[in-house]
Each structure stands twice: as structure tokens, then as C-alpha cells.
């Protein structure tokens, strides 16, 4: 409960910055979907016809919100003085691993609300939900791991943002390095192989990062 309370106050202290992802997923993404439907004059089967670009927008704009919240919640890693104070006072109850998991659960809940709304008009929203959950878990796990290695929250944020922009807006072909799968490429085999492996990699990074964290406090 202490960790949850601390995270609540960190979200509260974000002020207007907390609402940036909400504007993206609850206003911008639906408006883009409406625009696609408008281009085909809102025909009766518009919800089916616009599925590919809507799925693409989900991949482009939703997973990155986890990076935003993580970067703001771990902002003490952008100030070495503040970081040393945290370690000096042994604030172990503020477990970074638990905080990372709570951030993930928070973003998963936000996405779940959005996709429940879309499920009234489109199919396969559960598959999309699972994909985005794992993508956000991978991003957060990578951030957590790199933060523990470099003691910098900006380094992983820059790496992930660059990666996200490249594979969503520049090089969009399917590849071993691309964690995104677009609508016409979704198969059960691809989902199981790619996202099963991605989930395992995420867990591995969390475990390694946790061990690094423990050693840093024991020193």
C-alpha cells in the first residue's frame, strides 16, 4: 500500500503532464478513427473497412504512453543529487520494481477502457489488448533495466522513443527487430512466437534490473 500511495502522489504531482497520454488515447485516437470513417462517408460497414488503419494507430500512439509515465515517475534519475539522497536514506520501501509494475497496470487499465469502447464496433480487440499489454511491458522493462545500469532515466527514454518512431513511421515492414504487427500480418503463430518471446525478455530484464537494484542498496 505504501508503494501504491507513493505512486499516487507522483501521478498527482505530474499535474497537467499526467493528462497528455489521456488526450492522446481518448481524444486523438478516436478522432483519427472517425476521420477514417468520414472518408468513406460513414457507410454501414465502415467499422470493418477502417480496421487496418485503426489498428495501425493503436500501435503508433498507445504503447509509448508507458514511456511517458515511467520517465516522469523516475525523474529522480535525471538528478544525481536527488538520487544519492534516496539511496543515502535507504528508501527501500519505494521499490522501483513495484513502481514499474504499478505503472504498467495503470497504463493497461487506461488502454482497457479505450478498447472496451472499440469492442462494440470492431472485432479482435482482446488480441489487440494483449499485444499492447506486452509491448508496454517490454518498454517499461527495458527502461527499468537501463535505468539500473546507467542511473539515467533519459537514456532509455531516448532509445525507446527513437525505436518507436523508426518502426512505426519510417521502417514499417515486419522484421525480427520490429515488435509491432499490423492488421494484415496477424496470425496465431506470429502472436505466440513474437509476443511470447517478448514477454519472456521483459521478465528477464525485470529480474536482472531487480538484482542490480538490490546490490546498489547493499553497497
Image (spheres, rainbow, N blue to C red):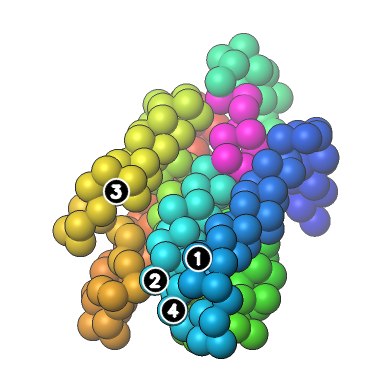
Q: Is residue 201 left or right of residue 30?
A: left
How packed is label 2: few (under 14 Cα within 10 Å), some, or many (20 or more)? few
Q: Which residue is mark 1?
A: 39
Please name the residue shown 62% across and 12% down the image. Answer: 81
Tell me the distance, in whole angstroms, between the alpha carbons under discs 1 and 4.
Answer: 11 Å
Relative to 109, residue 158 above or below: above
Given the current orientation, which residue lies at the most extreme left position? 175
Pick whichever of labels 1 and 4 is earlier in the sequence.
1
- Circle 3 or circle 2, nearest the eye: 2
Tell me the distance, in whole angstroms, between the alpha carbons under discs 1 and 2.
Answer: 14 Å
Residue 16 image position (x, y, % from top left): 78, 35
- Circle 1 or circle 4, nearest the eye: 1
Q: Which residue is mark 2?
A: 52
- Circle 1 or circle 3, nearest the eye: 1
Report whether residue 120 is seen: yes
Pick whichever of labels 1 and 3 is earlier in the sequence.
1
Give the extent of the magenta segment.
68-77
Tell me the distance, in whole angstroms, between the alpha carbons under discs 3 and 2.
Answer: 17 Å
Q: Which mark is residue 72?
A: none
Q: Which residue is mark 3?
A: 167
Q: Which residue is mark 4?
A: 49
The quadrant where residue 11 appears = top right
Pick whichever of labels 4 and 3 is earlier in the sequence.
4
Amino acid at each position: 500500500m505504501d508503494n501504491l500511495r507513493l505512486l499516487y502522489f507522483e501521478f498527482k504531482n505530474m499535474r497537467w503532464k499526467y493528462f497528455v497520454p489521456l488526450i492522446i488515447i481518448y481524444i486523438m485516437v478516436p478522432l483519427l478513427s472517425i476521420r477514417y470513417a468520414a472518408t468513406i462517408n460513414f457507410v454501414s460497414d465502415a467499422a470493418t473497412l477502417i480496421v487496418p488503419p485503426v489498428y495501425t494507430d493503436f500501435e503508433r500512439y498507445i504503447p509509448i504512453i508507458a514511456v511517458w509515465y515511467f520517465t516522469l515517475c523516475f525523474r529522480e534519475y535525471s538528478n544525481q543529487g536527488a538520487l544519492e539522497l534516496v539511496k543515502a536514506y535507504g528508501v527501500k520501501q519505494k521499490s522501483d520494481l513495484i513502481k514499474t509494475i504499478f505503472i504498467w497496470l495503470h497504463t493497461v487499465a487506461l488502454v482497457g477502457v479505450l478498447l472496451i469502447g472499440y469492442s462494440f464496433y470492431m472485432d479482435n480487440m482482446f488480441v489487440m489488448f494483449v499485444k499492447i499489454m506486452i509491448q508496454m511491458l517490454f518498454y517499461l522493462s527495458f527502461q527499468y533495466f537501463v535505468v539500473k545500469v546507467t542511473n539515467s532515466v533519459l537514456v532509455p527514454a531516448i532509445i525507446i522513443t527513437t525505436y518507436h518512431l523508426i518502426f512505426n513511421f519510417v521502417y514499417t515492414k515486419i522484421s525480427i527487430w520490429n515488435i509491432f504487427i499490423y492488421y494484415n500480418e496477424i496470425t496465431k503463430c506470429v502472436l505466440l512466437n513474437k509476443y511470447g518471446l517478448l514477454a519472456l525478455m521483459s521478465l528477464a530484464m525485470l529480474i536482472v534490473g531487480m538484482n542490480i537494484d538490490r546490490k546498489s542498496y547493499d553497497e
